[in-house]
Amino acid sequence: MAFRSGRHFLQIPGPTNVPDRILRAIHQSTIDHRGPGFAQLGTEVLAGLKQVFKTKSDVVIYPASGTGAWEAALVNTLSPGERVLMFETGQFAALWQRMAGELGLNTEFVPGDWRHGADPDLVESKLRADRQHEIKAVCVVHNETSTGVTSRIGEIRAAMDRARHPALLMVDTISSLASIDYRHDEWGVDVTVGGSQKGLMLPPGLSFNAVSAKARAAAKQARLPRAYWRWEDMIRANQSGYFPYTPATNLLYGLREALNMLLKEEGLDQVFARHARLAEATRRAVRAWGLEILCLNEAEYSNTLTAVLVPKGHDADNLRATILERFDMSLGTGLGKVQGRVFRIGHLGDFNELMLAGTLCGVEMGLAAAGVPHRAGGVLAALEYLAGAQPASRAAARA
């Protein structure tokens, strides 16, 4: 590849840009993971993650991708042949459903158009119809990375409560954790799946399960095979800050630094407000270009990414290739059913107004260079909004 000056713009919706200070934290000598120094590290990151998940329950850290945490959620709580209710909100929901089937579970996969989140009313009707309580779990992707649609988990929990159904609620937060408000305890979630490479600003390699008491009780009866993924081994060792097998020590260094940034320096409420502000600016740019946002329900717009439809007769991947070649910026590809029809703009993690401005400039120049029909002025619309939108921390200081 020819030399490119400046820094590559990585604007896919994860893995996200890793801040230099997190890279420096990772770049330390590995310590003895059975020694006293490690216990302090383990205790700190486990306590910090509970704050991010907004839970008082246990959080398990795996040296794995989010896919591993998906499997851990299923095999710890369920038995072969049990029914699981899942919702087709996009590519990652489909992949989780495929995994569940391959593990021997009986999945009911509710079809979706990839433009809406899981419907709380449909959750309620499905559970009310299950009078024998054969459905053992409801699995929902909170923020579908392939579509930019955020399902309303609090409303889904309320629907389950109205149905008076005992099924477990499992939620994938891989592209929303530490970016979009999420409340494991308040929303009555039993297993929350998370990963390190998006809102937590780390490289890929860590994944998480936040586990309710109800889920731990279910694990005692579950019969799906598990060894590496077994919660109880992890939770028992974690009580003293250790792990039952070799942890990803250097990634835990980075996680500690990320938690300091999110919890102690910026604050989660400010993190959520920043993501909301940058997401709204992005959507204003898309509308000004005359393009269509894939998500159809404004209440379900994602604050971490925006999926944009290209006009008929044009290829989103050709646009992405043009932007990469001409302007050294990577945008997210369309996945599964929307391949070639959408491109995805990631606006999450270590990200600010000027970085977004550069991103949107790259998109607008790319639309022109690739010959995609659009109106000029998307960047200006975003800048006008950002110039008038007060960051949450500044607004609070003036109140």
Image (tube, helix red, strand yellow):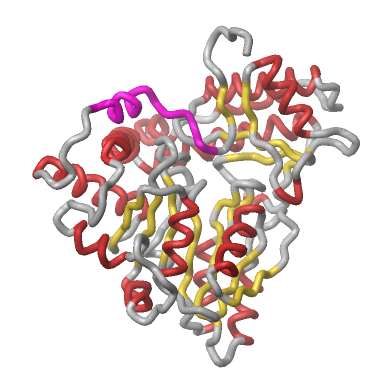
Residue 116: x percent and y percent? 69, 57
Q: State whether residue 219 is above or below residue 202.
A: below
From the image, which quarter does the N terminus lie in?
A: top right
From the image, which quarter does the C terminus lie in?
A: top left
Of residues 331 and 56, the one drawn nearer to the viewer in this rendering: 331
Of residues 151 and 344, the one drawn nearer to the viewer in this rendering: 344
Write the start and end of the magenta stretch as one range.
Answer: 14-28
Q: Residue at x 25, y 46 (%)?
A: 45
Q: Is residue 21 part of the magenta span, yes or no? A: yes
Q: Residue at x 89, y 38 (%)?
A: 312
Residue 263, picture quadrant: top left
Q: Is residue 357 part of the magenta span, yes or no? A: no
Q: Is residue 176 left or right of residue 285?
A: left
Q: Which residue is drawn at 40% across and 61% down?
A: 184
Q: In this view, which residue lies farthest toward the bottom?
A: 132
Residue 151, picture quadrant: bottom right
Residue 134: x percent and y percent? 55, 86
Q: Is residue 101 left or right of residue 114?
A: left
Of residues 37 and 267, the one drawn nearer to the viewer in this rendering: 37
Count of picture labels: 0
Q: In this view, which residue lies farthest toward the right?
A: 313
Does residue 65 appear in the picture of this structure? yes
Does residue 161 appear in the picture of this structure? no
Residue 30, picture quadrant: top left
Residue 327: x percent and y percent? 66, 16
Q: In this view, does 128 lie to the left or right of 211?
A: right
Residue 355: x percent and y percent? 53, 22
Q: Residue at x 56, y 58 (%)?
A: 141
Q: State whether residue 338 is above or below residue 332.
A: below
Of residues 312 and 324, the one drawn nearer to the viewer in this rendering: 324
